[in-house]
Image (tube, rainbow, N blue to C red):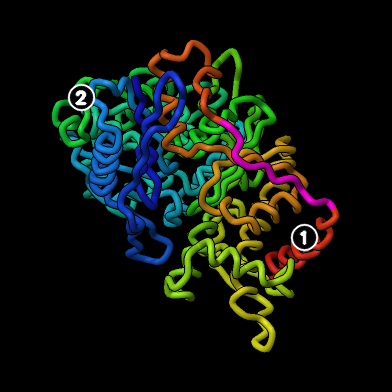
């Protein structure tokens, strides 16, 4: 018996098969092999075509099935992880009405801020735990105001994972956790936020029915099964946003535990049993996948949009793709801690919630042409990403989420010794890297949702630490000094 997990990111769609009994990943694949395009028809806009998600999910699914040679009937359940906060709108026939407005799109900020001010900050924060800011609800408000002819055809709005599941099952459903990440959830009433729907003038019928995170949420239609290379009737039993799912993949389910990722964006995600919030909504609180009425669990999320995308830009634009990422990591270590005074602000991928939805753009400051070279620029970029994450971690601490150990998958920026050493030395936290990723997490979630695992912990058989990075407290002073220069550059411009 096997479980199949999909991880719908902004760069690719990855699929992974795990063996149910051993928890071992037996095959994985992702498509496209080059990054999926993000369309930006205007400054601050970021869109993707949902049809491309489906095409690449089908290619990934068929690839893992071909790698293993197992029979489609051996796949017992499917789980889905997806890029958070995006908006997909469809008509009554489930036709997509416009490109998806994805997580790093900034256009809806005025609509979210307008709701925050009109409804009152205190009321909104107590009920939503976040400003509507740039979340899915505000994006739908933008469509309603800016594309009324399109909005008039909307039968349902969905998150990206809801769309992928709908293509599989022919049924539109969502989860409470998903609605919370879109700023649609009233935490006090424990139901969709009617007062926000009323403010924006949204018909509640546009919202999909709600299913549990771990439960059967539909079964593959014959058409979808044929396109995926799977068996009709296979159940979809789990879905979650990519960061709650990443936490699940790392067995981060209880208060005090911390998960991190550093792909296109960089995220630190802490679990709490308190429904706390930041008054400026710079870090955000959602329902975690392990939340229940009897044992509340909330995920406090810090996101830096400009993370791996900055490293990718340096490689593809400045270095013209002439070196690998591993070579870039070696190059960066030729420069000293602090990059000899060169500072990089990595905010070049849309409005940053951590900066109260400002879109500062990315910049290098203090560049000296007679002493700085490519090693300094690459190091300053990686350090700047860590410094931005640390800036947000200090905000997380102010709402009661501290960190002693950070768990992450051994992937993306965590493959860089410089990146992970800087993070460990600056925060003083031990970093544990694991043999997992989002697609594996989604596959384990499918097994939990199917009821195959009798306890949640049974789902983590096969998960183990691959590398541990301890902080070097003797080196911490140098990193602290470099961070203070970075913070001064951020505050003083």
- Between residue 338 and residue 270, name the one nearer to us: 338
Residue depicted at 57% across the width and 36% down the height: 124
Q: Is residue 466 magenta?
A: yes
Left-right relation of 11 to 387: left
The dot on residue 123 is: none
- Classify mark 2: helix, strand or loop: loop
Q: Quadrant of residue 446?
A: top left
Left-right relation of 288 to 64: right
Residue depicted at 61% across the width and 43% down the height: 268
Q: Quick one: label 2, few (<14), some, or many (20+) residues within 10 Å?
A: many
Asked if labels 1 and 2 touch by Cβ distance under 8 angstroms, the answer is no
Q: Magenta segment range?
A: 464-473
For label 2, the residue is 231
Asked if 191 appears above or below 59 in the picture, the reply is above
- Between residue 360 and residue 429, name the one nearer to us: 429
The dot on residue 479 is: 1
Please state, as top left, top right, bottom left or bottom right, where the N terminus lies in the image. top left
Asked if 452 appears above or below 275 in the picture, the reply is above
């Amino acid at each position: 018996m096997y479980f199949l997990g999909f991880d719908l990111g902004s760069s690719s769609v990855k699929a992974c098969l795990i063996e149910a009994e051993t928890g071992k990943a037996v095959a994985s694949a992702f498509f496209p092999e080059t990054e999926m395009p993000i369309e930006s028809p205007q400054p601050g806009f970021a869109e993707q075509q949902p049809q491309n998600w489906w095409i690449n999910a089908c290619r990934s699914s068929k690839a893992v099935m071909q790698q293993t040679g197992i029979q489609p009937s051996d796949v017992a359940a499917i789980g889905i992880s997806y890029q958070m906060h995006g908006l997909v709108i469809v008509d009554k026939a489930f036709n997509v009405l416009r490109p998806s407005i994805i997580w790093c799109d900034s256009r809806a900020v005025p609509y979210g801020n307008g709701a925050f001010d009109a409804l009152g900050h205190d009321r909104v924060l107590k009920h939503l735990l976040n400003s509507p800011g740039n979340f899915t609800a505000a994006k739908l408000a933008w469509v309603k105001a800016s594309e009324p002819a399109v909005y008039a055809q909307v039968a349902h709005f969905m998150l990206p994972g809801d769309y992928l599941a709908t293509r599989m099952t022919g049924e539109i459903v969502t989860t409470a956790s998903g609605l919370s990440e879109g700023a649609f959830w009233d935490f006090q009433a424990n139901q969709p936020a009617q007062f926000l729907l009323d403010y924006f003038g949204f018909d509640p019928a546009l919202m999909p029915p709600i299913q549990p995170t771990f439960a059967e949420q539909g079964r593959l239609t014959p058409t979808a099964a044929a396109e995926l290379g799977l068996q009709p009737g296979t159940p979809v039993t789990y879905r979650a946003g990519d960061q709650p799912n990443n936490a699940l993949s790392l067995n981060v389910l209880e208060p005090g535990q911390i998960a991190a990722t550093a792909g296109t964006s960089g995220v630190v995600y802490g679990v709490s049993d308190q429904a706390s919030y930041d008054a400026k909504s710079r870090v955000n609180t959602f329902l975690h996948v392990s939340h229940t009425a009897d044992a509340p669990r909330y995920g406090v999320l810090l996101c830096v949009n400009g993370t791996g995308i900055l490293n990718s830009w340096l490689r593809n634009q400045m270095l013209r793709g002439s070196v690998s990422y591993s070579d870039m990591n070696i190059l960066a270590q030729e420069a000293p801690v602090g990059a000899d005074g060169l500072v990089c602000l990595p905010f070049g991928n849309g409005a940053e919630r951590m900066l109260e939805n400002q879109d500062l753009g990315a910049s290098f400051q203090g560049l000296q042409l007679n002493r700085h070279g490519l090693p300094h620029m690459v190091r300053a970029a990686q350090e700047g990403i860590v410094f931005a994450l640390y800036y947000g971690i200090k905000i997380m601490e102010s709402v009661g989420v501290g960190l002693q150990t950070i768990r992450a998958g051994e992937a993306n920026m965590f493959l860089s010794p410089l990146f992970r050493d800087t993070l460990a030395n600056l925060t003083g936290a031990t970093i544990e890297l694991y043999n997992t990723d989002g697609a594996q997490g989604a596959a384990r979630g499918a097994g939990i949702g199917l009821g195959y695992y009798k306890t949640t912990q049974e789902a983590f058989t096969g998960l183990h630490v691959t590398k541990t990075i301890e902080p070097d407290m003797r080196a911490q002073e140098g990193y602290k000094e470099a961070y203070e220069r970075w913070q001064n550059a951020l505050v003083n411009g």
